Image (spheres, grey):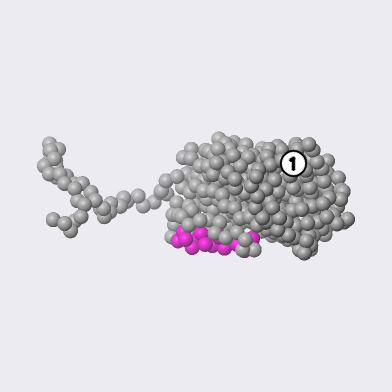
Amino acid sequence: MNRGNIGLLLLAGLIALGCIVAGCTDTAQTTSGQSAPPTGQETTGPVAEGAGDVSAGNNRFTADLYRQIAGDPAYAGKNIFFSPYSISSALAITYEGARGETADEIGSVLHLPANKTLRRAGFAGLDAALNRGDETYTLRTANALWAQEAYPFLPEYIDIAGRWYGANVTNLDFGGDSEASRQTINRWVEERTEDKIRDLLPAGSIDSMTQLVITNAIYFKGTWVKQFDPAETIEEEFRVAPGTTVRVPMMHRTDEDAIYGYAETGTLQVLRMPYAHGNGTELSMLVLLPREDNLTAAEEALDPGALAGVRDSLTDRRVRVVFPKFTLETDYRLLGTLAAMGMSTAFSPDADFSGMDGTDMLFISEVVHKAFVDVSEEGAEAAAATGVVMNLKSAPGGDTTPVFRADHPFIFLIVEEDSGTILFAGRVVNPETP
């Protein structure tokens, strides 16, 4: 079992979550960070259908993004963990303001439904399902817009973000106090992730050119239906590569009640470990374990069609489970990753987000993502957040008076103006030195 498989375990669980939730029919639009849907929003028809389309697209994006990160030499031999739904949610809100080639690229990379009714109702329905609540676990997601005060965003864009994505607007003064604005946004993320995601926006990520920040936060904490006995947890070897092992705490569940969804192929073992739930959405962790050290078999199973086939093949049976305890904290800056996946225009001077403000002056200057997961005998706790920073391509209109501050070395000339003859030339490096 390769060390990189640890990140894959929870990634597969998130994919399974998307597939499970997509089947919900009792869905509705959410308001900002709240679980109660607004009145007048249908909970069947386009919402249910759209949720399936959005979930399918999210799962395709999951496989694509995983492969992009896994193939990056910077992450070679490192764990991987992220929330595809968090990233998709934040970028879907961004997509609503994109136009032309910029929108085409974002929609293609995220595999978003082209039909706006299905897309918007789908995200609203999934958010409602995730925020519905259950007495045995905690699961919630929230979106928000953070806008430069007095910047003329189009009312239509603000309405779409609030109505369909629950992303209400808070005005901040990025130009006057970017650091206070950054801390305000980071506190919002911390509060909605039980302090598991801190400092989502790093120092210097926003400045006077920032006009909008779009955020998503997601948090989950649940217990296994069949918990592991801490007394059975012992340190054992974990093979990180052929011939290389480390010692880690391994949990054991091998009793007669260890009944799990299980399937196997010649190259892969699959285990479904469900989380306890009442009348809310059913959640589980889906583990794809290659029989050899090579992760290829597990990665190939990430394709949505293959994954659906694997899930359909699961049957309940007794399984002797030995599983590591682990905690992962990851931090990604995704501009290069997403550009390599095909949405480079959004980050360039050619970006078109005129659906946000009626101009072509905005572009995405940063996409940041952080994730956390802790797996223990009792269950798992996971959190993630995504921030999309929108900056101006150039200085805004208004006072265009230039500032000339000669507070560093310079060259000067004395010129005869009629002929343009240079009479004297010099360089000042230190004005105090004769």
Q: Quadrant of the N terminus?
A: top right
| Direction from residue 433 to residue 132 in the image, left or right | right
Where 305 falls versus 411 (above or below)?
above
Q: Is residue 368 visible?
A: yes
Is 406 inside the magenta-drawn segment? Answer: no
Task: Inspect the image, locate mark 1, and give the three-letter code of the amino acid beneath it.
Answer: Arg
Residue beneath the point at 46% across and 47% down: 392
Q: 106 or 6: which is nearer to us?
A: 6
Q: Is residue 384 visible?
A: no
Residue beneath the point at 68% across and 38% down: 296
Question: Residue 321: x percent and y percent?
Answer: 79, 52
Question: Residue 44: x percent and y percent?
Answer: 79, 47
Q: 10 Å neighbourhood of mark 1: few (<14), some, or many (≥20)?
A: some
| Residue that badge 1 annotates | 291
Magenta span: chief secondary structure: helix
- Quadrant housing residue 257: bottom right
Q: 157 or 302: which is nearer to us?
A: 302
Is 183 inside the magenta-drawn segment? Answer: yes
Q: Secondary structure at mark 1?
A: loop
| Direction from residue 280 to residue 249 in the image, left or right | left
Give the number of callouts. Answer: 1
The span picked out in magenta is 177-193
Where 266 falls versus 155 (above or below)?
above
Q: 278 or 313: which is nearer to us?
A: 313
